[in-house]
Amino acid sequence: MTLDTAQPELIQLLTPEGERIDRPDYPLDLTPDEIRDLYRDLVNVRRIDLEAVALTRQGELGIWASLLGQEAAQIGSGRALRPSDMVFPTYREHGVAWCRQVEPIKLLGLFRGVNHSGWDPAEHGFHLYTIVIGSQTLHATGYAMGIQRDGSDDATIAYFGDGATSQGDVNEAFVWASVFNTPIVFFCQNNQWAISEPLEKQSRIPLYKRAQGFGFPGLRVDGNDVFACLAVTRKALADARSGQGPTLIEAFTYRMGAHTTTDDPTRYRLDGELEAWKLKDPIERVKAYLVKNQLAGADFFADVEAQAKQIGSDLRKACLELPDPPPQAMFEHVYATEHSLITAEQSAFADYLSSFADEGVS
Amino acid sequence: MTLDTAQPELIQLLTPEGERIDRPDYPLDLTPDEIRDLYRDLVNVRRIDLEAVALTRQGELGIWASLLGQEAAQIGSGRALRPSDMVFPTYREHGVAWCRQVEPIKLLGLFRGVNHSGWDPAEHGFHLYTIVIGSQTLHATGYAMGIQRDGSDDATIAYFGDGATSQGDVNEAFVWASVFNTPIVFFCQNNQWAISEPLEKQSRIPLYKRAQGFGFPGLRVDGNDVFACLAVTRKALADARSGQGPTLIEAFTYRMGAHTTTDDPTRYRLDGELEAWKLKDPIERVKAYLVKNQLAGADFFADVEAQAKQIGSDLRKACLELPDPPPQAMFEHVYATEHSLITAEQSAFADYLSSFADEGVS
Amino acid sequence: MTTTTLTLAKALNEGMRKAMEEDPKVLIMGEDVGRLGGVFRVTDGLQKDFGEDRVIDTPLAESGIIGTAIGLALRGYRPVCEIQFDGFVFPAADQIITQLAKMHMRSLGLVRLPVVVRIPCGGGIGAVEHHSESPEAYFTHTAGLRVVACSNPADAYSMIQQAIACDDPVIFFEPKRRYWDKAPVDRAADPLPFDRAQVALAGTDVTVLAYGPMVKTCLEASGATDRSLEVIDLRSLNPLDLPVVVDSVRRTGRCVVVHEAPVFSGYGAELAARITEACFYHLEAPVLRVGGYSTPYPPSRLEDHYLPDLDRVLDAVDRSMEF
Amino acid sequence: MTTTTLTLAKALNEGMRKAMEEDPKVLIMGEDVGRLGGVFRVTDGLQKDFGEDRVIDTPLAESGIIGTAIGLALRGYRPVCEIQFDGFVFPAADQIITQLAKMHMRSLGLVRLPVVVRIPCGGGIGAVEHHSESPEAYFTHTAGLRVVACSNPADAYSMIQQAIACDDPVIFFEPKRRYWDKAPVDRAADPLPFDRAQVALAGTDVTVLAYGPMVKTCLEASGATDRSLEVIDLRSLNPLDLPVVVDSVRRTGRCVVVHEAPVFSGYGAELAARITEACFYHLEAPVLRVGGYSTPYPPSRLEDHYLPDLDRVLDAVDRSMEF
Ligand SMILES: Cc1ncc(C[n+]2csc(CCOP(=O)(O)OP(=O)(O)O)c2C)c(N)n1
Ligand SMILES: Cc1ncc(C[n+]2csc(CCOP(=O)(O)OP(=O)(O)O)c2C)c(N)n1
Ligand SMILES: [Mg+2]
Ligand SMILES: [Mg+2]
């Protein structure tokens, strides 16, 4: 893969150097406050991520899938949504979760092993993390079919990775979305790697072109450019709401960390690649823009840092306090309605546990 | 769907009226003998098909998937192959089977219920019929990966229908074929219907365009034009052999009969559609060409008819003589190697059967 | 008059129609379910009356059917999916096993997935490969799913409605070779709860357990022997109505389990294991299983040998009595 | 010296290496099996030594992996597919169940599919959802597949070679939490046939049946009780080596079956049913099953409660003795 993102098809509104580019087809008028807020978001989610990585190193989490490098793709797209929209994430969309007001601690349960998910999807318009690659794209498409039947102008957005594009389910979601013209945005974060496999193992052409084969628009956006991600996703969502059907957005970005905390990328990729991408850091360019345009000074940046630090330490504290579920929780929520087998097993388990208590007493 | 096949993208070398069209990009030089042979093929496979339909009506077959209307797509593509190529058919490729010298009677076993397949795939370069929609496309792709590893210039061709393009497996096959640049031709017979569902339920754009999304060429050929199907498939196979990877061919044709003999198309489609397609009959246009160009006269056509009739009656006779397999055949070929459970069940079954014999004696 | 004679297929059709009338969130989806009314005509006429938005002809992809049904359920709908034939449920296995079954627990109970997966099942209709499978054991082993099988028109009518009303995902098996069997259906009858077994025939010598297509076979077997068979129609496979079964086996002391699926590692194994544990001192013979052989489903000309029939059921009854 | 101490993962690695050296048709394929050597490093170094044509990093799609492996086998290759984690085998369920398992019979024996599907299985490593499943029952019920599970380095080394050499498709379960367990492996030893069970520990009171990860647990349990346990490592689940099992149960009169998968409709049910039929008059107690509960695999902080451990095995042994 080329490390040069200066590709003609790449939609960019903010260069790595912090220069604003005008794209009449993707107009974006942000107030200074809005830009500062985006910057804050980016810094905050990076901080949450760093803290989670640290917690994993210290054994407090079993594993963590880091979003490092993908902050702009997630904040840009996440901030394009409205509250009643529905997000279908993978396991790496901590930045989108932030935009959907999911408290950071709620993301940690899964990775700590205290639950399989920690938030109410309906409350946040943010569905559960999905680990089986690609399966959520069909859920998102079905949900969008429901929106159509409700006569609502909500939209859904489905996140997935470059690797996921090879799964049958993702392609079936493209078929469905196209045939039923559903209000959905397929947001593919092409972070160049699926664990150890580079993009070439999944596709020989740029991923955004996949959409052409299914008859709906696909486009590639600079995934490290929060302005571009915001503008492009807004446009795609607006199209979805107005009955123009699906769009595939390929956010061209880079997984700056390991696949997860258990992965060792030195086995399969060169340091140089990471160094090159560091020059395109999604946060630095917003900072450069703010500074160049005198929209923020040292005070602001110090304040952002302080807030992020606070969020990090709050998260750490909350994580350490996360209780293990009681053993009986295994039997809860297997079914929504009474199920005699579960009832029987649960009571046998209770008896079994209390047989140890008896031992203790006798 | 439009019934007008006069579409700019449609590759046609022979009009429904029997006019030869020149396409320098798809050169085709056939001797009169070769053309007459193609005509013979078309008539023969239609006859085989008609006989099988009749046998089904009479209860000799349980079901039959008719190729009526798709003769040109199958003969044209089938005759483009060389013996060492490998074909992966669906359940409807009786015409391709004919080209691969599979004796017609061998196709009937499956439909009569005496076996699940009746021929040796290696001997004919013609794999088993596959009923689970789309699954054979991955087998074909894997086989093509094997060809690459052998350093051979053989190629594979995978047949599937318009409906099949919605299956995850077919799209995964496109991914694999593209990434590994395998020597394969994807031959989609778009007969406009997947049982009762018209093409619009599977795709909102022409199917040949699907290939674009995966980065390899796709094209649409007049599937009722045996010349065009032959020329286009030859070209795609040549590309495959010379390392240029996969091609998707959409043969635009029409299922003139019911989906299978148990289907009732009057429930879901209009007579007018069939009537319109009858004007594009794949056999009539070759006949018109032969006549117009004085390449064949009454004798030839009478001879063709007679041969077809003979093939039909031979097939009928062979079908009536097809023996039921002995009950013990159930246990054969479950495994290639000794398997104690099968051995045990088989001998218990023998005992069970002989317990009735005892009854008879006593 | 609330009682009419209906085929099993028509009873399902009427049950779905009633559910659709009562709840606008109920949707039908699958291949050919709309204009054609399904290859078995079970959804006949529903699209005409409820429109294309509620009776959806889907693209040809089973994973897509179940995956989008999950999404529709997340939006508050109650999709009833038709898998055209038993053998075509496997492309949807991942969505059923890793998503449909687990989502409720994954969400800590916040998400409900009232999705019904209708599967015409079993053999005996002379069909080609993949059209005669009995895949119930794959689903009974999958925690989070309810698995039921109807065996007669009256149950078909009530159970499909109960399945649709249920807030858990339900795998709903329909015995395809019994689609055309007729029986009276009383629309006003109070149905048995969904998860209860039914003693289809009382008896004293041997308890015979069956479900779906084999219930009829076992009832016929009972008519062809002097032994007194107690035939239980399990109806619900997961959960299993153990009390009804145990009560019977403790009385008879003998049990034969009958299903079409291969015996090895099949659902009958669970029945045998569980019953033996619950009735150990009451059993005069081991629980015997009659089922398909451990081979792929054979070509249809052999299916009469493969499928349990009256003779094989009675043979097992004899072996049980003589054990 | 032909004996070295190896981890189970390394033993598999060496077994595959040997198979690849001996037969140029042997291929490795899967996600991340090449440069990375697999997420568990089981294929470490093989791509380096055998090249990208023989050790293939595939696109991320399990149906594609098995489907193309079938095609490669049709062309004369012997693909060894890695499914990255147990929970990700389900997207490939259709290719495994309807194609891989049935093709030999479909072809009347003309086509052989020597494909090995390696599945790291089971829990106990503190993983997130879908990474701790025990899906063996789905495959033991599928006629046409051989299903085996190794439990120790020596078996891992020989069984993977036997699986690759076998002309039938083999589902090969690897107990992921035992990957790092070490034991001596004698490369020159004559291995037990592939489909044979092994008495891992002789005993007289209770026969304990296990496979894969639970063998070690059962051996440990035996060390923690005064009862004399006969622990049998089944190794092959389909076919089952019934004679070895029956011989043991007839001697002990008691049997406990242990696996990680949910008990309901699990593989243990088949063992219980079959053993009861074969040993009815020898059994002093019903065959008891210890396994996962009938719930989705819980979050990892609860897995110690979910998984059978020494205590639960011994509890079942006690219940059996006291029955
Ligand atoms: C069906 C399935 N197969 C395999 C895996 C194991 N796995 C987890 S993440 C991953 C790579 C995903 O790559 P990509 O889609 O690019 O997303 P990224 O992790 O880069 O964000 C794999 C193979 C899985 N989770 N699900
Ligand atoms: C996986 C799967 N799902 C459903 C079916 C049932 N079925 C058989 S043929 C068919 C329609 C196929 O349409 P198409 O691919 O266009 O091929 P055609 O029959 O028109 O040649 C369906 C749905 C099947 N065989 N396999
Ligand atoms: Mg990626
Ligand atoms: Mg078609």
Image: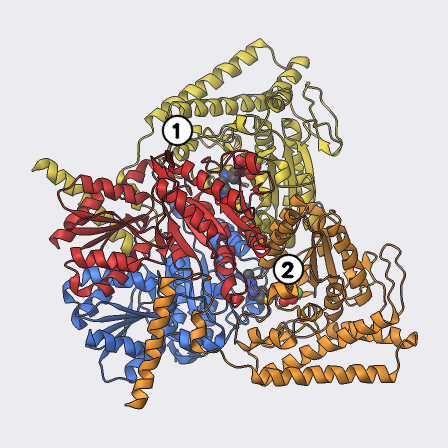
Chain colours: A yellow, B orange, C blue, D red
Amino acid residing under circle 1: Leu
Compared with residue A238, is residue B79 higher up or lower down, i.e. above or below? below
- Classify mark 1: residues with Cα within 10 Å, few (<14), some (14-19) or many (20+): many
The secondary structure type at the circle numbered 2 is: helix
User: Is residue A102 positioned above or below A144 on the image?
Assistant: above
Q: Position of residue B326 (x, y in %)?
A: 45, 78
Residue C271 is drawn in which quadrant? Answer: bottom left
Query: Does residue B111 lie above or below D129 as drawn?
Result: below
Q: Which mark is residue A203?
A: none
Can you tell me whether the CB of the residue at mark 2 lies under 8 Å from the nearest atom of ligand 2? no
Which labelled disc corresponds to residue A61?
Answer: 1
Q: Nearer the viewer, residue A111 or A158?
A: A111
Q: Is residue B230 left or right of residue D151?
A: right
**What is the x, y in percent for residue A166?**
59, 45
- Which residue appears at 31% of the width and 31% of the height? A323
Q: Which image quarter is the C terminus of chain B in?
A: bottom left
Callout 2: residue from which chain?
A: B
Residue tagged by mark 2?
B201
Quadrant of the snapshot with the N terminus of chain B: bottom right
Q: Is mark 1 within 8 Å of ligand 1?
A: no
Chain at numbered mark 1: A
- Residue A157 picture quarter: top right
Q: Is residue A53 visible?
A: yes
Furthest toward the left, the residue is A362
What is the three-letter code of the residue carrying label 2? Lys
Q: Is residue C282 left or right of residue B100?
A: left
State how far apart marks 1 and 2 are (Cα).
Answer: 46 Å
Residue D121: tell me if it is visible.
Answer: no
Q: How many marks?
A: 2
- Compare residues B32 and A62 and report the one nearer the observer: B32
